[in-house]
Amino acid sequence: MSESWGTLTSKAESAARGGNYAEAKDCYKQALADAVARKDVHNAYYTACNLGGLLRLLDEFGEAEKLLTQAIQLRQAYPQQLAREPISPITELERILVKQNRLPELEQLHLADCEKMLALFGKDSFEYQMSLMNLAKAYGSHLKDMEKCRVNFREVLDWSRSAEPITCKMVYLTYDGVLRAAGLTAEAAALQEELAAFKSQSKG
């Protein structure tokens, strides 16, 4: 009897932590084959993300990109199951594109995801707004277009005011990090004042 997806995944994670990357890759590949054979979308997605991320760290960019692209296709084909998952193949693929200076492809990657989430969930959805925030981050951190970064972040900030407090704080802190990394400390300080004022108003 072949080993289960859970056992194979645990073995892969343990091997990766121990630096046994050949074993980790082999176990992840077996786990992915198991998930695909069982048509288990969730486990196939997670394994493709994890193996793609491991291969990226090992500078095996071609195979990593294939796996991450497969995971993105799953995310778009099964958005109700996968769009809110904390692990994201888009984040990993972004790192590859940045490292290879493929910035036009990076912009298109995020724009395509925004369009998909908007069409599926609507403008005021968590899924779309998180996708838009990732686009805004890319503009500020990698594409060096602070004007587009500001415009997109402003939409997400405005939306976040009616979201859960933890989501609102996360959006503000994310933007704060982008601004500070760009050396815009005065803008970041003003953003923190805006957040403090909003919290005070909410309590009042």
Image: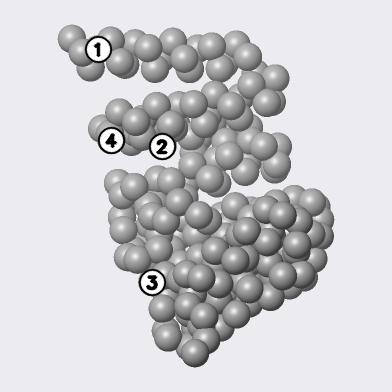
Name the element at disc 3. Answer: loop
Name the element at disc 1. Answer: helix
Residue, disc 4: 163
Q: Which mark is residue 156?
A: 2
Badge 4 vs badge 2, beta-carbon distance below 8 Å:
no
Q: Earlier in the sequence, mark 3 or mark 2?
A: 3
Q: Is residue 105 visible?
A: no
Q: Which mark is residue 78?
A: 3
Task: Describe residue 85's horizontal placement relative to residue 177 as left or right.
Answer: left
- Crowding at dot 3, Cα within 10 Å, few <14 / some 14-19 / many 20+, comes out as few
Q: Position of residue 204 (x, y in %)?
A: 18, 9
Residue, disc 1: 201
Which marked residue is nearer to the observer: mark 3 or mark 2? 3
Q: Position of residue 14 (x, y in %)?
A: 62, 58
Distance, label 2 to label 1, CA atoms, is 19 Å
Q: Earlier in the sequence, mark 2 or mark 1?
A: 2
Q: Position of residue 157 (x, y in %)?
A: 40, 31
Q: Earlier in the sequence, mark 3 or mark 4?
A: 3
- Identified at 75% across, 62% down, the residue is 20
Q: Earlier in the sequence, mark 4 or mark 1?
A: 4
Q: Is residue 34 above or below residue 166?
A: below
Distance, label 4 to label 2, CA atoms, is 10 Å
Q: Position of residue 58 (x, y in %)?
A: 79, 59
Distance, label 3 to label 1, CA atoms, is 39 Å
